[in-house]
Image (cartoon, rainbow, N blue to C red):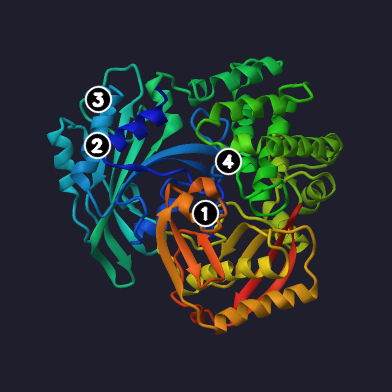
Amino acid sequence: MNLKDLYIDFFVSKGHKQIPSAPVVPENDPSVLFNTAGMQPLIPYLMGQPHPYGTRLVDYQKCIRTNDLDSIGDKTHHTFFEMLGNWSLGDYFKEESIKYSFEFLTKVLNIPINKLAVTVFKGEDGIPKDTESASIWQSLGINKIAYLGKEDNFWIAGESGPCGPDTEIFYFRSNDEVQDIFDPNDDRWVEIWNNVFMQYYKDNNGITELPKKNVDTGMGYERVTAILEGVNDNYLSSVWIDIIKKIESLSKYSYEENPESIRIIADHIRTAVFILGDEAGIKPSNTDQGYILRRLIRRAIRHAKKLEIESNDWEIVIANMIIDKYKKYYSELEKNKDIILDELTKEKNKFNRTLEKGLREFEKIITNVDKVLNKDLAFKLYDTYGFPIELTEELAKEKNIEVDIEGFKEKFKAHQELSRTASSGKFKGGLAGDSDKEIKYHTATHLLNAALKQVVDKNVHQKGSNITAERMRFDFSCDHKLSEEEKQKVEELVNIWINDKIDVTVKEMSKEDAIKSGAECMFIEKYPDIVTVYSIGDISKELCGGPHVKNTGELGKFKITKEEASSAGVRRIKAILE
């Protein structure tokens, strides 16, 4: 049985309810471009909002991280990965959590106890040593325990919010004899599971004990699968091996001859499939998630050329294998299959048209460069030949030449506002919770959606949103640029509803009943069978995780600042509340 199924079945047997994976593109979360961890979609519930499924939850979550893109090509890193997680929202705490983890590892997965070790928090900055977790582990027969500081074993997202010690579980991935003393710096010990105990709250006044404590755990599916199958290379596990062998057969090189390029192609095409398959409708572009998507596809193409892959439809062959492999767990891949394959091919053809010219130009440019490629030449490769700066860096690195990245960025910024990766710090993020202004903007998106349906077309649907404390951005399906009259009517209608001071109400009901009642939602697949429905009078009814204001009168004056194209068939409105 697949590890995902074993995990879900085990925690369901312990009273947990399975929740569906959230989309890879977060809804109304401006802190990141993609969901980067299993806990991220659960932030409102970790902050205290009741979850429709109760206090014990379990899932497998689609995640994308682009902060270590340069590490892709080694044995363990992936841009897309799956995170197995179980949560207690004010229910059980350390003892049950640790015992569940121990039972799953030793009884379900049959991992020998002597191959397991743990780290716990040693106490620091007035926060006590986590002797409770250590004694629980010892009672279970785990004596390989290391005490580490805040950097390793204390968790907080951002500057403030819920926080607490964690205990990390390690597996001895080696045929060597297991040492009696556990050294977490020994590379043979690999972290496989992290149990975070949110028992404190940090703010400007310091750290206080939380009255309601949560547990948040995360286990990496790819890493643990490789461990269970006894391979020291994630890409040789059952998660990847069929895709690796297919790329080998398309290439003129074996995996042993060029593992890096084969891994990059496998990883990047898989990630591209999941981004394109998401209901948010992301397409390759030069901004935000679309820029990451374009970068991944183009990097895969570059490495396909290095492997001398000549097949005209190699990306379709690999993408089809990935869709077939994952459709049982993520039905949106099958549903959006035509879009995925079409966009991959279009982007490949687009890039191929300029790549050959660009590579020739690069070789010409590089002959006159001594040690550093200047910003003008780097920008020319981007602007004229569509080379992402990362590709220029990669090519230059092969020639032992540096690139003036800072200078390029200045020219890049002047040229247009570009996307930032999830790790660049563009947004503040963290588990500190929504500010009052962000909560107001969240409610305003519901009013805007309702107004667009009345003014533009009843078939308008939300395609995405992004909210900060300064503004809201709302993407919606529409086949034309809004006229000035349409924009004015939409703005006026939203302000009428604000001035009417309409109550915002919330109800829990079955997903089926919610849809029958006319409630709208952006991603139907992401919601569990019991859902939360927010209504604004008889104007708007939507499935939503919240939070929202209590009354529209709290919002202030709504003003549209810009209306523009987002992608084919999708328009974007930017607006503020004054």
Asked if one can make out residue 491 in the rendered structure from this viewpoint, the answer is: yes
Amino acid type shown at disc 4 = Leu
Is residue 391 rendered to the left or right of residue 544? Answer: right
Q: Is residue 174 above or below residue 49?
A: above
Q: Amino acid at mark 3?
A: Lys
| Viewer-side label of 2, 1 | 1
Question: Marks 2/3: CA distance?
Answer: 10 Å
Image mark for residue 516? 1
Can you give x and y, in whole percent of width and height, for residue 481 in the image?
79, 64
User: Which residue was labeled with disc 4?
Assistant: 69
Question: Do the residues bearing badges 2 and 4 touch, measured as CB atoms within 8 Å?
Answer: no
User: Which residue bears the numbered disc 3?
Assistant: 107
- The kind of secondary structure element at disc 3 is helix
Helix, strand or loop for disc 2? helix
Q: Residues within 10 Å of mark 2 (few under 14, many from 20)?
A: some
Q: Are marks 4 and 3 in contact (CB under 8 Å)?
A: no
